Image (spheres, rainbow, N blue to C red):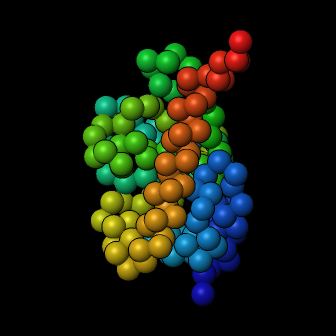
């Protein structure tokens, strides 16, 4: 049975519109049970560009600023959203800096923990990667801009 705080976290994560949208409440309960909860103070670095994350971070409280130097823009993420996923996916250094705007609490999931969950629950892995792909596609579309209007 999940702890009360964990139940609140699962509720936040499963209701997020910009997060891992295809995961079920049961998926979130499994993830919350295996994740490490970490707190960050305002201004703390959550993800550092050019450093591997070796996992990914799921925001459960607070907001963080994502800065991609090559785009010279920032984006704010909040509860239910993911950061560090590009480094997690390709096992290369992070492409952005992510800094806590206010007190932030995250679930950190390292690669071996996620891989073992996916081996035990293959459908979780399928929903997880589908969610990640849709989130990355949405962000890529934001960078590319709106489609051209037909002439």
Q: Where is residue 144 in the image (x, y as percent from the top left)?
A: 56, 23
Q: How many marks?
A: 0
Residue 20, above or below 30: above
In the image, taking residue 81 as reference, residue 133 lies left or right, namely left
State the residue at coordinates (45%, 31%): 97
Which image quadrant for residue 20? bottom right
Instruction: Give the x, y percent position of residue 145.
Output: 62, 22
Q: Residue 147: horizontal and vertical position, in percent?
A: 64, 23
Choose between 70 and 21: the one closer to the eye.
21
What residue lies at 56% left-to-right and 45% top-to-bottom?
135
Q: Is residue 68 visible?
A: yes
Tell me where residue 117 appears, x and y as whole percent: 39, 73
Q: Is residue 99 visible?
A: no
Residue that extends furthest to the front in the rendered view of this protein: 151
- At a point 39% along the width and 32% down the height, the residue shown is 95
State which quarter of the image contains the C terminus.
top right
Q: Nearer the viewer, residue 88 or 132?
A: 132
At 34% from the left and 75% from the top, the residue drawn is 119
Q: Is residue 76 above or below residue 144?
A: below
Q: Quadrant of the N terminus?
A: bottom right
Q: Residue furthest top?
A: 151
């Amino acid at each position: 049975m999940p702890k009360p705080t964990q139940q609140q976290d699962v509720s936040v994560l499963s209701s997020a519109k910009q997060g891992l949208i295809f995961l079920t409440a049961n998926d979130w309960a499994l993830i919350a049970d295996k994740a490490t909860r970490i707190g960050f103070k305002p201004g703390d670095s959550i993800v550092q560009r050019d450093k591997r994350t070796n996992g990914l971070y799921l925001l459960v409280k607070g907001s963080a600023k994502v800065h991609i130097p090559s785009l010279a823009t920032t984006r704010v993420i909040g509860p239910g959203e993911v950061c560090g996923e590009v480094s997690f996916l390709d096992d290369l250094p992070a492409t952005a800096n992510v800094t806590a705007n206010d007190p932030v609490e995250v679930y950190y999931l390292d690669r071996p923990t996620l891989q073992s969950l996916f081996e035990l629950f293959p459908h979780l892995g399928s929903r997880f990667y589908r969610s990640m792909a849709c989130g990355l596609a949405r962000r890529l579309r934001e960078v590319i801009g709106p489609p051209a209007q037909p002439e």
